[in-house]
Amino acid sequence: MSATTRVLIGLAVGAAIGLLLANQNPLLALQVANVAQPIGKLWLNALQMTVVPLVLALVVVGVNTASDAAASGRIARRAIVVFVVVLTGGALFAALAAPLVFSWFPHRPELTVALNHATLPSAAQVAPISWVDALVAIVPNNAVMAAAQSAMLPLVVFALFLGFALTRLAPERRALLMEFFQAIADAMIVIVRWVLWVAPLGVFALILSVCARSGLGMLSALGVYVLVECLLYLAVTVMMLPVAVIFGGERLRRFALALLPAQAVAISTQSSLASLPAMLESADRRLGYPKPVAALVLPMAVTLFRLTSPVQYMTSAAFIAWAYGVDLSTAQLVAGALLAVVISLGSVGLPGQVTFIATNLPVAQAMGLPLSPLGLMLAVDTIPDALATLGNVTADVTAASVVTRQSRRDAA
């Protein structure tokens, strides 16, 4: 039985027991919820304890990986620029669209109460601060203190500076530090895998506690989250078609038909890497891209470029804000979107379930949102995976089309 199946079973059993208790004996339901609450909180804390070192290591390694790729030639540099621009566009689109779509669904105040009781918020809402204070706070005056306080945005800024600084060191010293940070990331992922081994129990306790208090409210809310995530994945996938037409010089029908084989593999395998041979075949035989361009850009895209990741991070943050009745400001949304781009570049290539907390938590925390729903969201986030891979593969080939057009202009 796969880990995903075990987590979904834990979710279903916990929800069923919680709903049954809430309907049959509300007093007993509250008592059981009080017992289950610390179990779920312990599990969520165990996931959160790896976030600071993992994010720091992933960003440092990600910056150096992108730097190495860019140093390999003009095509690679252009590809990275395209990746960053498209990722930023996807993140900003999600920052605009996700809160709007969630506003279409009615908010239930009892859901906020149930979430607060089930697992205490890890990030408290604070009074609004001026844009000047918010801007100054982005650069930490003490990186160690930022890490100790789990201030993710300043920590990521420090990690970016550190990562770029490593690119200026002598090769042997840089390699030594890169090995160190990669080892930290690998060790944190091992711990996360250990914690995920008991994920069915943690998810069971979390959903039992919430459903015992809110009844069907939490299940319907998770359904809304999955629905909105799927809608936004499909939206950014469709948006790649006009990008290929306008910036890649493609004909819409020809490009859409050429994508179908790779998209079919993406949906069936839920793996961009498994879709790479189909992408290369379509780029060569159906679209006629130069082999040197496709052979470089598409593997780079699989390694560095995952369009739906920032979309997921922003959708998750918007869901938490909706569940708690929080109105997100423009500054919060923009800061979250830009951070989502950085986090996505550092985390590409790692299993989604392993890094769900490490990638979603920094964005939610930087936006001043509670973190308690993330454990439940991890359990259901595997459902839209096929659509996420579909969007990523479509974006990979789209990026190749843009780089190909630019390369042909140079050759002309």
Image (tube, rainbow, N blue to C red):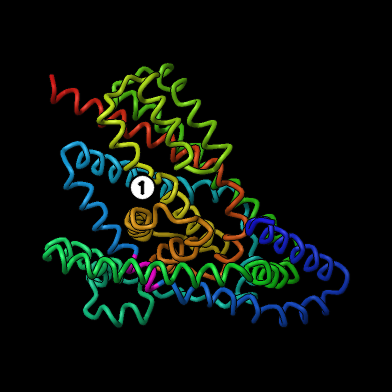
Q: Which residue is mark 1?
A: 303
Residue lying farthest to the front in this orientation: 172
Q: Position of residue 174 (x, y in %)?
A: 18, 66
The amino acid at mark 1 is Thr
Residue lying at 23% horizontally and 42% vertically, measured from the top left = 81
As for residue 54 lying within the magenta part, the answer is yes
> As drawn, is 391 to the left or to the right of 160?
right
As for residue 368 lying within the magenta part, the answer is no
Above or below for 173 versus 92: below
> As drawn, is 246 to the left or to the right of 126?
left
Report the magenta residues as a range: 52-57
| Residue 221 visible in the displayed image | no
Residue lying at 37% horizontally and 61% vertically, measured from the top left = 332
Above or below for 30 versus 403: below
Q: Position of residue 198 (x, y in %)?
A: 63, 71
| Residue 316 visible in the displayed image | yes
Rendering quarter of residue 366: bottom left
